[in-house]
Image (cartoon, rainbow, N blue to C red):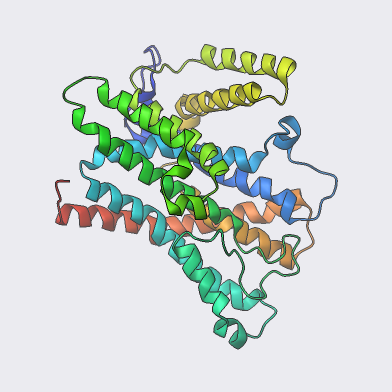
Amino acid sequence: MNVIDPKKNIVVNDIISSKHANNFNLLRIIAALGVIYGHSFFLFPPDGTFDIFAKLFPFTYSGSISVNMFFLISGILVTQSYFNSKSVYKFMTMRFFRIWPGLTLCLLATVFIVGPLFTNLSTKDYLLNLDTFRYLANVTLLLHTFNNYLPGVFLNALEKGSVNSSLWTLSYEVFCYVVLLICLHLTISIKNNRKYAYKVGVCVTLLVFLVYPSGYSHYIINVLSEKHIHRFFFFFGFGVLLYLFRNKIPIKLIFLLLLVVICALFRCVADGSDIYKLSFDLTFIYAIIYFAYLPVLRKLKFNSDYSYGVYLYGYLVQQIAAYLFKLSPYQSMLITFPVSIFLGFLSWNIIEKRSLDFAKKLTKKYKVNA
């Protein structure tokens, strides 16, 4: 186990050099539960309660904050994965087996178990309906911005017919992987010639994609929203930069407190402005890095990553709970939190972990120098 010397000047590299030296798994499970928390106020009848984060920060809400956390941490760890992979083949293989096996199991359970149980159609009509298989195909191909509905399912819910709206962000996650691969592959070849040249190249390429994302492909224009690309790629891109400059970025409580003070000042003098929102995002990013380092949290020892499974099933569990019970938002969490965590546990141990182990064996068996 990698133990950080408390007297040492801590930098980002110290917390990503070993999975046991950081709290990323804990932060990701908190983010997954944060998405469920935020959705509770849309999926269950209001009872006068409210999302605390939306109250404090009217320009966002807990669900968005949580997804931003996912993309930031993903930017760090996926960039690390690229450099550890040593080949494009291994990187792409590991990314594929991280996303699609867990997603596929979730989709099969949704379409062929949840669907027949909660549709207002007969089982025969449901299974013979082309929209049932369009949903399966669209979400598998990450084209589900066109279709988040299964025939007759959850039509009496507050969010009528919405089956699993959380899955729409996966398209952007994969897009970020592709952009990262392009950025690094275009610039890494000059790494050995100039010490910082490739990092500058990566930064410039990231900036171009951030400023002008819709100019690159028909897929982006027709499937992804430029607004969301800017948002997600901002956080993912910062994660990439945190990894690239991991030896230069210190982690100190005083810096976090300074950012909090600056953010508070901007709120007082420019509440609602872009500069305030930017100061909030930068403070949030540094806070995540600080809490990823915080030694006291490492005592919880979250060595497995259940967050993806929790994210995959959370919204679906909420819709089922809303269909079966009359609950307020906070009451619903007493059911949706533990059930989603249990499903995340099963997803990790039954499919995700085994898929990643298989991917590692596959890349060792077929070594490709590319």
Residue 112: tell me if it is visible.
no
Residue at x 47%, y 69% (from the top left corner): 137
Residue at x 67%, y 45% (from the top left corner): 38
Residue 310, placed above or below residue 320: above
Residue at x 41%, y 54% (from the top left corner): 99
Residue 148, placed above or below residue 27: below
Q: Residue furthest right?
A: 48
Q: Nearest the camera: 206 or 92?
A: 206
- The image quarter containing residue 256 is top right
Q: Nearest the camera: 154 or 214?
A: 214
Count of residue discs: 0
Residue at x 63%, y 26% (from the top left corner): 277
Q: Is residue 85 shown left or right of residue 349? A: left
Task: Measuring from the top left, give residue 336's x and y in whole percent.
Answer: 65, 55
Q: Is residue 330 shown left or right of residue 75? A: right
Q: Residue furthest front?
A: 215
Task: Measuring from the top left, give residue 216's x and y in whole percent.
Answer: 41, 45
Q: Is residue 81 shown left or right of residue 171? A: left
Q: Residue furthest bottom?
A: 124
Q: Is residue 20 shown left or right of residue 358? A: right
Residue 163: tell me if it is visible.
yes
Q: Nearest the camera: 207 or 160?
A: 207
Task: Measuring from the top left, give residue 190's x and y in whole percent.
Answer: 20, 28
- The image quarter containing residue 156 is bottom right
The quadrant of the image that shows the N terminus is top left
Task: Measuring from the top left, give residue 286's x and y in whole percent.
Answer: 51, 23
Residue 182, placed above or below residue 97: above
Residue 251, placed above or below residue 83: above
